[in-house]
Image (cartoon, coloured by chain):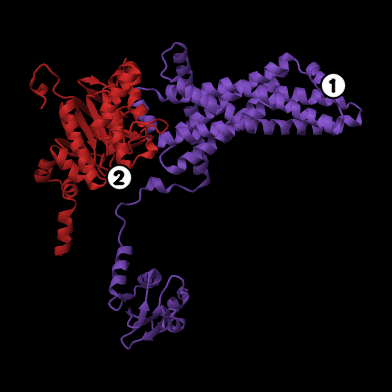
Chain colours: A red, B purple
Amino acid sequence: MEQTADQPAAQPWHIEVRDLAMAYGDRVVLSGINFTVKRGEIFIIMGGSGSGKSTLLRHMVGLIEPATGEVLYNGVSFTRADPGEREAMLRRFGILYQGGALWSSMTLAENVGLPLAQFTRLRPDEIREVVSLKLAMVGLKGFEDFYPSELSGGMRKRGGLARAIALDPEVLFFDEPSSGLDPLSARLLDDLILELRASLGATVVVVSHDLASIFAIGDGSLFLDAESGTAIAQGNPRALLEQCEDPRVHRFLTRGQEAASQARNV
Amino acid sequence: MSMQASASKAARNEIRFDYRPDSTLMIELTGSWRLGNELPAPREIERQLESDGRPRCVAFDATNLRTWDTSLVAFVARVVASCAERGIEIDRNGLPEGLKHLLKLAENEPAHAVSESGSGDRRVVYRVGKAAIEFAQSSLGLFNFTGLVVIAFARLLSGRARMRLSDLIVQVQGCSAQALGILSLISFLVGTILAFMGAVQLQQFGAAIYVADLVGIGIARDMGAMMTAIIMAGRTGAAYAAELGSMKVSDEVDALATMGISPVEFLVLPRVLALVMMMPLLCLYADFIGMLGGAAVAAGVLHISFVSYFTRTAAAVTLTTLVGGLFKATVYGVLVAIAGCWRGFEAQAGSSAVGEVTTAAVVDAIIWVVTACGLFAVVFNLLHL
């Protein structure tokens, strides 16, 4: 485990979200979002469909500008950074989009190699080597010259992950990693996330509503609620399951088991 | 099996109404209820419900029911609704078990109340206002996008843009060599059409040779550039919008942006550059083929030899005219490329979005090109070019 959190000199939080509000035009979707993520933690953003989980993630990586509030990495504001600083910060992020988002006009090797070609001084043959290594890490060794359209959904996701870790990121973002995967592949992806966290020492932010995955990998979490338009619970998912009094959170984390059993008893 | 034989009789659904002494209307459902069969007319049921001995309760008897599907559910739901309107009780005990469950499901409240913003107002004033605001926003988006392209171009000139030469070459190939076939066909035909139009008039004055002037100047000044632009709008502009639109929809554009690679530099720049570089060449080629078309008509219809036709053309078409046409073509290239890329980036989620932005890109490009052509005509006239 990372020890940086114990050092007084180091910034205690890797990621800090302060009073974030998100709006589409005049319509405020979520407001008053405050949370912190420790270095090396796996942090889950959860909530029902349409609660704004993915939107929050897009705010954190600068794809959407917040209406108010800011996001800080290592104590430096990402929201207020100028374009140059922001580009430098982005380079330390790795993001896995829902469908993998591999560039369809390039082969898998070109996809993973593009950030290396753009941001490092590696020679083409060295890039090729690094790409093979990254692909092997996600179990796609030998698929270098395949185009994304020739791969299955799960392979595309893993390809996207290989691209996300190409530059050894400090923060990894996952947008619903288990969506569209069979239970076994989803489980394998969870294991891969845990392994990558351990080996890269990266902080991981996962948007998910897959309970199995949430309990398996989550250290901390944030629960978004669409109706009240804010976060209604925070903490370790397992602790939330045992201690959280809020019926909305409880219903979600127990998959509505209690409501269902009550209905049966009536 | 005797299915066929009995089917003819039992194929139709039937209902029978039966009044019980305790003012209960018993609806007897018989036969097979299939979606292919007609449903009993709603008026008949309503008449029964409103008859003199107005029933207090409606019950069902399904003992002679052979088979049923959604058609029976729909029928019963209609009866239930009619009864609810009139405050008549419903006794569902006589219905098949499965049907009772389906009815219950259909009567469930929606899980989430439908949001009011989604329903929208249908009034004319509201819709006109909404369209006006959307137009203003979209124009603002266009200015913003054009600005980004200009900045990206400046960065390219200063050598800081992230654009791959290989992408540029692929785009150049797509909008030059591969477009020659259709370009040849269209510009040859436009040349012949122009020649025919002129020939009919000029022959009356015995000035048939001036067809060469008409076709040469018409093509070199305006028609060559405009036809090339319209073909490229339908071919390349549409392709740009569709490519970038589907990349946008599948998060590929976002994936570039969050990697610190500007999508405008990486995706838009090579496309705009390719078209801008190729348009003058394509236009020159179209001019030549168009004049060939004119020469073919002159030779075939007016019996003017190729040599005299081209001598006449060379005398009529000045370098200024030709270069003016090529300049116009270059500007049209910018317009077509910007329309395609901008619309592509505008695509929202969903697979229909790509089709929509592609259509919009072609429409925009053609409108812009024709408008620009009109403006050029005025400006060139003022400048005496």
Q: Output the chain of dot 1.
A: B
Q: Residues within 10 Å of mark 1 (few under 14, many from 20)?
A: some
Q: Amino acid at mark 1?
A: Ser
When the figure is inspected, residue B298 is found, relative to residue B15, above or below; the finding is above
Q: Chain of mark 2?
A: A
Where is residue B217, by image quadrant?
top right
Which quarter of the figure is the C terminus of chain A placed in? bottom left
Q: Secondary structure at mark 2?
A: loop
| Kind of residue sitting beneath label 2 | Gly
Q: Is residue B88 left or right of residue B123?
A: left
**Residues at marks 2 and 1 touching, judged by CB atoms closer than 8 Å:** no
Report the side of A141 relative to B157 (left or right). left
Instruction: From this view, report whether residue B16 is shown above or below residue A59.
Output: below
CA gap, disc 2 and disc 1: 71 Å
User: Considering depth in this image, is B68 or A28 the residue closer to the camera?
Assistant: B68
Q: Is residue B222 visible?
A: no
Q: Position of residue B385 (x, y in %)?
A: 73, 15
Seen at 45% across and 81% down, the residue is B4
Which disc number belongs to residue A180? 2
Residue that carries the numbered disc 1 in the rendered image: B308
When asked about the image quadrant of residue A29, the answer is top left
Is residue B344 placed above or below A261 in the rendered structure? above
Q: Secondary structure at mark 1?
A: helix
